[in-house]
Image (cartoon, rainbow, N blue to C red):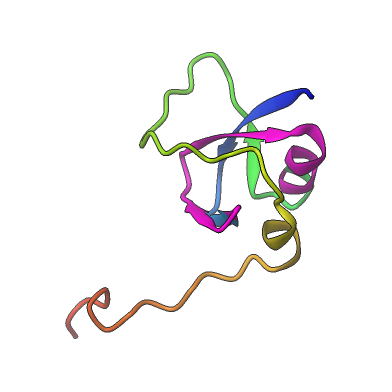
Amino acid sequence: MNSILLKVTSSVVIAGEIARAGQLVELTASEAKTLLHGGKAVLATVGDEPSVEVPVPVATVAAAAVGTETPHATSSERSPS
């Protein structure tokens, strides 16, 4: 199976994990196509370095393709007003 390295341009959920803008992820060709067409990622280039090294397994990205919802912040994650 071929895998494709992408650079995430907008936060998206991949295999149950949040991939944030700037992260590099390795996906199957069909999963990569879904994110590329949705504008959530671009092809990674040689000069791209991972901003945060978080392993994202090559897995189903159906959640990223269908619902690109971002979970609501919990009260401990919210900034004080």
Camera-side residue of 42 and 23: 23
Q: Residue furthest left?
A: 80
Q: How many marks?
A: 0
In the image, residue 42 sits, relative to residue 16, either above or below, namely above
The image position of residue 74, as x and y in percent, is 32, 80
- Quadrant in which the N terminus is drawn: top right
Which residue ends up furthest to the top in the rendered image? 46
Magenta stretch: residue 72 in it? no
22 up-or-down from 3: above or below = below
Residue drawn at x 27%, y 84% is 75
Please, is residue 9 above or below residue 68 in the view? above
Q: Which image quarter holds the C terminus?
A: bottom left
What's the magenta region? 14-35
Residue name at image x 65 percent, y 36 percent: 42
Q: Quadrant of residue 52?
A: top left
The picture places residue 63, in percent across and down from the top left corner, at 69, 62
Q: Is residue 3 left or right of residue 81?
A: right
Residue 34 position within the rendered picture, expressed as x and y whole percent measured from the top left: 78, 47
The picture quadrant where one finds residue 46 is top right
Across and down, in percent, residue 72 comes to: 44, 78
Q: Give left or right: position of 72 versus 46.
A: left
Left or right: residue 44 compared with residue 71: right
In-front residue for pair 19/42: 19
Residue at (67% x, 35% y) in the render: 27
